[in-house]
Image (cartoon, rainbow, N blue to C red):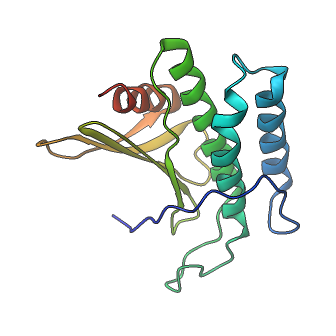
Amino acid sequence: MSCILPLAPMPVTWPSRGVGSDSMIVIRQEFADVRGERAIDSGSATRLAGPLNEILHLQELGPNWNLDGARPIASSAVTSAANLLRSVEESAFQQGVAWEAPEIGPVPDGGVALTWEGGTRETLMICHPGEPNAVECIHREAGGLSVCQVLPMPEGVRLALWTLDND
């Protein structure tokens, strides 16, 4: 498994270069949604702005960003990660599960990693380039073995909620 380092939250800004137009459209739509057009509650904007911005800024990483041949972060992975994040936040709110933003980081294949921790559970989800409907998930509960699966996005959302709903 690759080493994934979380990025510090950044102010909501738009990078001037290195961001695919498809990703910009999706991310701008997500920001519009959390500002009230589609948001379920007023706290969505606060909960999602920082993590969405972190995901967006990953596209500023160029080729070889890890000095070991990493690919630039793909627009498709950014789009998938933003959609996954939004779905988890929305489902958590609907089901009364306490929301915690994930740690967000780049993956050498051009993907985006989201890591949630809750009580005795942790889940790493990787949105790989070109795989908009699936997410690689590695999860475990304290004392147990790690399980690695490729799941459809809705199952990934359920797994994130399983992780968060663990006090």
At 58% from the left and 61% from the top, the residue drawn is 8
- Considering the image in quadrants, where does the N terminus appear? bottom left
- Give the percent coordinates (x, y) of residue 136: 42, 45
Residue situated furthest bottom in the rendering: 67
Q: Is residue 90 left or right of residue 25?
A: left
Residue 3 placement: quadrant: bottom left
Res 79 quadrant in image: top right
Residue 97: x and y in percent read 45, 20
68 vs 17: above or below:
below
Labels in figure, total: 0
At 15% from the left and 45% from the top, the residue drawn is 145
Depicted 145 relative to depicted 7: above or below: above
Q: Position of residue 13 (x, y in %)?
A: 82, 56
Q: Is residue 17 above or below residue 101?
A: below
| Foreground residue among 20 and 97 | 97
Which residue sits at x=77%, y=35%?
A: 30
Q: Which quadrant would the C terminus be assigned to in this image?
A: top left
> Which residue does the image show at 70% across and 16% down from the upper left?
40
Q: Residue 87, position in %: x, y?
A: 59, 28
Q: Is residue 15 above or below residue 83?
A: below
Q: Which residue of the protein is positioned furthest toward the left in this rendering?
A: 143
Q: Nearer the viewer, residue 118 or 29?
A: 118
Between 55 and 109, the one lying in front of the other is 55
Question: Seen in the image, is 157 located left or right of residue 90?
Answer: left
